[in-house]
Amino acid sequence: MARFGLLGKHLGHSFSKAWFTAKFEREGLKDFSYHNIEVENLNGLREKLIQEGIVGFNVTVPYKRELLPLLDSIDTVANQIGAVNTVVMGPDGTMTGYNTDHRGFEKTLRPLLKPWHTAALILGTGGAARAVAHVLDELMIDYRFVSRNPNNCPECNALDYANLTSKDVRNAPLVINASPAGMHPDTDSYPDLPYSGFEKFHLAYDLVYNPSETVFMQRAGARGAQTLNGHSMLIAQAEYGWEIWQSALTSPGQAV
């Protein structure tokens, strides 16, 4: 039996368990299962995963960066990003971290890009925000982080929501919400932006996927902006993560 899972703190809203369970059933993988791994902290995590027979797991907030010190090795790109969302467990309990968020984001962003999408605001400074920044670096799109607590990430050189102006928004035709604001069950929350800065040339991309239309998307859309939620990105990154797990499971010495 190959057991996979999702590591996080509050997973009642999670898409992953239902999606992977359906995938395993659809593909006839009767010996594969997927489980939520809810933990309040990472103390004793390795022992817990070994005891439960986990061979691979996804990582969601708030552990995409917190998990890094516990990993035995980390993929080059994930190391550059500074966050992981996919982990392979070796038969000896070693953990290798990867990041598939950046690939999912890039795959879904590229078809929507227009010549005027030359500058962006990234809302948030966590693991997802850093994966977004990695993609924008590769696409040579200028960006600034926006944070409620800029001092918590001095290397981000983030703008403070409190000082953000409508001109800042207008001058960034691409605005990506990489924070959890608006995610179920807090569906009434939203990034505190001057939404008057949005125009018809804007793309407002919300990495939140539940609900399907967030307040951020509604407010930007009301100003004429094109909007997209994170569902397609979520599927794309999950597929890439599955490829990583398949490769590991077929490697010599990997126990299933």
Image (tube, grey):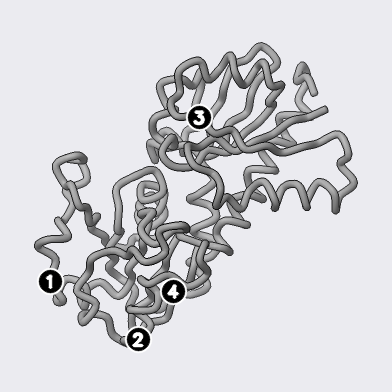
Q: Nearer the viewer, mark 2 or mark 1?
A: 2
Q: Residues within 10 Å of mark 2 (few under 14, many from 20)?
A: some
Kind of residue at disc 4: Leu
Give the residue at mark 1: 165
Disc 1 element:
loop
Measured from the top left, where is residue 21 in percent x and y?
Answer: 76, 47
Q: What distance separates the C-alpha of mark 3 from that of mark 4?
A: 38 Å
The tag earlier along the polypeptide, 4 or 1, is 4
* Badge 3 or badge 1: first in the primary sequence: 3
Q: Is residue 29 left or right of residue 130?
A: right
- Left or right placement of residue 52 versus residue 67 in this view: right
Q: Could you say which is closer to the camera, residue 225 or residue 107?
A: 225
Percent x, y for residue 145?
24, 55
Closer to viewer: mark 3 or mark 1? 3
Of callouts 2 and 1, the N-terminal one: 1
Q: Amino acid at mark 2?
A: Ala
Position above or below: 126 against 181? above
Check whether the beta carbons of the residues at disc 3 and disc 4 lie within 8 A of each other.
no
- In terms of sequence position, does the residue under pointer 2 or pointer 4 come before the other? 4
Badge 4 crowding class, 10 Å Cα cut-off, few under 14, some 14 to 19, many 20 or more, is few
Q: Which residue is mark 4?
A: 113
Q: Quadrant of residue 253?
A: top right
Disc 3 residue type (three-letter)? Val
Question: If the image is split into quadrants, where does the C terminus sit?
Answer: top right
On residue 222, the disc is 2
Q: Is the residue 121 above or below the residue 198 in the image?
A: above
Please identify, in this view, whether the residue under mark 2 or under mark 3 is nearer the observer.
Answer: 3
Task: Say what amino acid the circle numbered 1 marks.
Answer: Thr
Which numbered circle lies on residue 39?
Answer: 3
